[in-house]
Amino acid sequence: MYNSSSITQILLLAFTDTQELQLLHFLVFLGIYLAAVLGNGLIITAVACNQCLHAPMYFFILNLSFLDLSSISTILPKAMANSLWDAKAISYAGCAAQVFLFVFSIAAEFYLLTVMAYDRYIAICKPLHYRTLLGSRACVHMAAAAWGSGFLNAVLHTANTFSLPLCRGNAWQLDQFFCEIPQILKLSCPDAYLREVGLLVVSAIFAFGCFVFIVLSYVQIFRAVLRIPSEQGRHKAFSTCLPHLAVVSLFIGTAMIAHLKPPSISSPSLELVVSFLYSVVPPAVNPLIYSMRNQEFKDALKKLIQSAVSQQH
């Protein structure tokens, strides 16, 4: 048994041992990271600078973009550095920071997506009460609750995970390209990690409750939309809901594939690919999903780009 505080570094799993392929991975990671930063940055700037987008839905999308930037910036820069310099190690403190920031971002994002489902439910099923139930103060409180819940989750899981004694000799090797709690638990002593498993179960129950709330909200939304008599009205209602539904499906779908796949088909290479899907793809794709289906976003982004080009000239 080893005290975790005596460990100075942990080894991460590389995508490949071939130097040429590592350079290719670096370029792919860099492209995805720049796309995520650019996409989320444009959404943040558009919402902040355009008066037409100062509505509850766009306020929550603004928060979502900040969390997307946080989650992808927690993982990809280190993965890019390791691929570029042919390295595998991450410091123990760096690993703890990565776990904290990633759990915080992912948990807060899921709670925020739940709040956004409530926003769409009120907008479509109870439109006359929308401004009453979702005033500026209520929106700030709900966003703060999502961020606070993510922070509390991160503190509990990080403190719990990194207080466990480790039992794997000197080979602190994770079968993952970033520090992930289930992989760290594999290094822990079998009789010590039940406390963290219990906490994970409690978190999973809360997450399932949020998932049920989202599903029930959309059942009510679709029932209300189908009762709208005009086709144009139905199209407008669907156009505000489908991006959120697509983001929720991508977020939950990739996470379920990563954590609920059968152990019989598990392998290190498959673990890498699946974890890449749920940790990197959603933050990079979310801005595209929200901007493609929303005409107000398109108009705001067009004005923003035209303003930036005119200032250059």
Image (tube, rainbow, N blue to C red):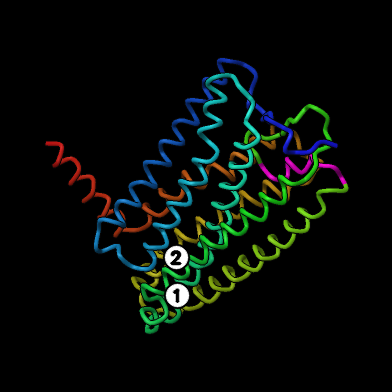
What is the residue that sits farthest to the top in this orientation?
19
Name which residue lies at 54% across and 73% down.
217
Name which residue lies at 60% across and 36% down.
94
Between the C-alphas of marks 1 and 2, the distance is 10 Å
Q: Give, as a single range, the part of the protein colored magenta.
A: 180-190
The residue that mark 2 highlights is 241
**Where in the figure is residue 21, as x and y percent of width and height?**
57, 19
Question: Dividing the picture into quarters, in which one does residue 140 lie?
Answer: bottom left
Circle 1 packing at 10 Å, graded few (<14), some (14-19), many (20+), is: some
Task: State which quarter of the image contains the N terminus.
Answer: top right
Question: Dividing the picture into quarters, in which one does residue 10 lie?
Answer: top right
In the image, is residue 95 above or below residue 86? below
**Where in the figure is residue 97, as x and y percent of width and height?**
59, 42
Q: Nearer the viewer, residue 52 or 79?
A: 79
Question: Dot 2: what SS?
Answer: helix
- Specify the label residue 225 is tagged with: 1
